[in-house]
Structure formats: C-alpha cells, structure tokens
Amino acid sequence: MKMKLLMTCLLGIASVAAFAQKGELKDAQSAYDNYATLRGQKVAAIQLQAKKSVADAKIAIDKASTNDKTGTLPQTYALKAAIYSSLAVDDTVATTSAPLFAAADDAVKKAKELDTKNEFKKLIDDANINLAQYKLTAGVKDYQNKRYDEAYKEFDYYRTVLPDDTNAIYYTALSAGNAADKDPKYYQYALENYKKLVTTKYTGAPKAYYDMTTIYLTQKDTTNALKIASEGIEKFPKYSELRKREIEIALVSGKQADVVTKIQTAITNDPKNKDLYYYLGLTYSQVADAANGRATKAKDDATKSKEKALANDNLAKAGDAYKKALEMDPDLDVFNAAQRLPANKQKEYDAELAKSDKMLEPAKPYLQKALDLKPTDLNALSNLRNYYRAKSDPAHAAENKAKANELKQKIDAINSGGGK
C-alpha cells in the first residue's frame, strides 16, 4: 500500500510539472494575444498596458523555450518569433533591437520547419510582417544616409520575406542601382529586381523599364538598353518618356534608319507631341549626313549620285518634320529668330535669347549622354559644341567658350585622323 501510495504521489507531481510547463506556453500566448489587441492604440494608458503584456509574454516564452518538454514545440518557436519580432519593431535602439531581431529570425525559420500542418500560420505570418517592417525601417534609414549597399541588404531581406510586395522589389532595385555607383556588381542586382517588378501589376512598371535603360546606358550597353526600351513600349505604347528614350538610344547607337519607323509609330500614338517631330527631323538629318559621308568616299559616279539623292531626300523629309514641330511650338526656333533681330532691338533680342536659353537647357543632359556613349562621334561632339556656342549666360561665358573650343579641337583632331 505504501509503495502504491508513493507511485500515485510521484505521478501526481509529474502531472503538475507538465501542467506548469504547458502553463508557461499558455501564459505567453495569452499575454501576446492581449498585446496584439492593444498595440497601435494612441491612448497612453493602453500603450503602457500593451508594453507590459508583450514584456510578460517574453518572460513566459523564455521559460517555455528553455524547458525540455515545450522547448522544441512548433508553437513555442512560432510564438517566440511573434513576440521577439514585436519587441524588435517597437525598440528604436539598434543595439538592443538587433539581438531581438536575430532571435526572432531564427525562431521563425524553425517554426516554418516544424509546423508541417500550418497550425500556427497566423503567428508565423505576424512574425514575418514584423521582421519585414524592421528591415524596411532600417533600409529607409540607410538609404536616407546614402548607405545604399546596406539599404540594399535590408530591402532584399524585406523582399525575401514578402516576395509579392511590389514596393519591396522596387526599393531593392532602387537601392542596388544607387549602390552600383561605388560597386558595379550591384547593377546586376538592380536589373534582376526591376525585371521581376515588370512582371507584376506594379503601377510604376513603365518607369521601371525606363530605369533599366538608364542602368544599361550607364554600363554603355546600348544594345540591351534599346532592347528593354522596345519591350517596355510594346506594353506601354503611350508612355512618352520611354518612347523618347528609345529614340535617343537608337540615335546615339547609329541606328538612325531603323528608328524612323519607331518615331512614326510614336507620332501615331501621340500626334501632338512636338518633340517627336523634332526627333524625326533630327533622325532624317543624320541619315542624310551619313549618306553625304558615303557619297564623299564613293569611287564611282553612280554610287556618289545614289548617295547624294538619298541625302537630299532625307534632308527634305527633315525639313518637313522640323516645320511641323515649329508649327506646334514656334519657340523651338527662338535662337535663330534672335540672331536675325537688328541691333536696335536689344530688349527684344535679350528676351528672345532668354527664351532660347530656357529651351536649350533641357537638351544638355541628352547631348552629354550621347557624347559619353560615343566620345569620338562627330555628331555628338558637334551637337554639344553648338549647345555651348548658343548659350548666352554672361556669368559663364568664358567657361562655355572654353568648352566649345575644346570640343572643336576634338572635332578637328578626328577629321584630321588624329582621333583614331
């Protein structure tokens, strides 16, 4: 009887211990649920209660985590991930929030592995959202402080946790693109994410295509730049900025003849866009220049006549396109109009010249980009030189003149064979 009584007592003690162990897990769940209900409230007293609840939840889950009976349960890992990630997000001090984040990150990985029946999916999802938010906040801070490589890592984690979040993909691409200024390997990371982005329903997809062309142009890869621009235009034919970019790339790539069809298609989609007519005129002009160049080098009269005829035909088409552009906006010709004014019309001259400068300035980045892509291209050199010659900025007159002269020397060197 005594032995039977002893065994009964031992079993009773074991049951109490097991209940106590399970009790810690239950307490942690209850405290976390209370916190989840109260968090986000703006009333100070409620905020304090939420803070106390999550602190109580941490104490309970720490005990459950170190217990042999409950430490390896999927619920324990899922709950720890939710509690620790909540604490990490709420903690604004990096030195104390980082260990909380690391513990939550480890716990959520283990919870996903063990929760084969998805019984604790809600807790795991809560933890993931917290972890993503933590990395998003860190990434924004790094980005604002121009630590683009670190921002990329933070946003990439955010993207991995929430792969369908288009903002996560965009932020990752954007930070990688900026990080590439110091480390070119990030260009590839940026492109990979932009390419993912344009397969989603992201509303900024047209701009994403445009950004990809910028990356390729920075790498002096005009082939892929043109390819991605064309792909974007197929999907978004009315996005004028991308259409213009496609034309600009084709021009600096020496594919003037091919781009005529593209510009005419662009005009069909946007018939009131004066810039497209200007680009069409510029394209025809460059086709004519190329034909004249071939005519000069031709060794037989038949070829020379054929090329001259081609040049004249394209010059006539260029004139028609420029005329159409000027009909839409007479200010496009303000520089030449200013030059024709008599000396006693100084006020009118100054006013027209000011308008000319205003029209010229937006062209500068494109002229410079054309030269950057093809440093020995005569058209690119001449166009940029003409920009500096046309500028009437008195404060920078000497500087503009010097730049124009420098470009003239490069042009002369190429023409004489010294630039080859």
Image: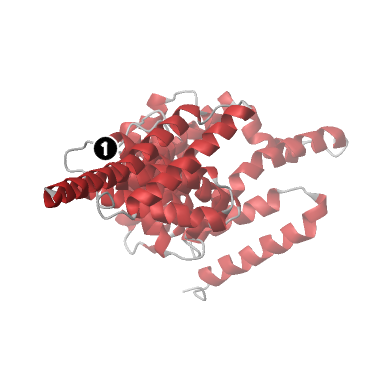
Instruction: State whether residue 246 is above or below residue 330.
Output: below
Left or right position of 215 against 301: right
In this view of the protein, which residue sits in the foreground, 75 or 211? 75
Furthest residue in direction front, as rendered: 1
Local packing at callout 1 (Cα closer than 10 Å; few below 14, some 14-19, many 20+) is some
Q: Is residue 162 visible?
A: no
Seen at 62% across and 28% down, the residue is 45
- Residue at 76% across / 39% down in the picture? 353
Give the x, y percent position of residue 152.
Answer: 45, 54
- Classify residue 413 by image quadrant: bottom right
Q: Amino acid at mark 1?
A: Phe
Q: Residue furthest right?
A: 344
Helix, strand or loop under label 1? loop
Q: Nearer the viewer, residue 140 or 242?
A: 140
265 relative to 302, above or below:
above
Answer with the quarter of the image where residue 339 lies: top right
Left or right relative to 399: residue 209: left
In the picture provided, is 261 more to the left or to the right than 381?
left
> How many labels, in total?
1
Instruction: Say which of 74 and 20 sits in front.
Output: 20
Q: Position of residue 290 (x, y in %)?
A: 41, 54
Which residue is at 40% across, 46% downward? 158
Say if residue 386 shows up in the picture. yes
**Where residue 22 sits: x, y (%)?**
29, 42
Q: Which residue is mark 1?
A: 120
Q: Residue 210, how many percent across, how many down?
A: 43, 42
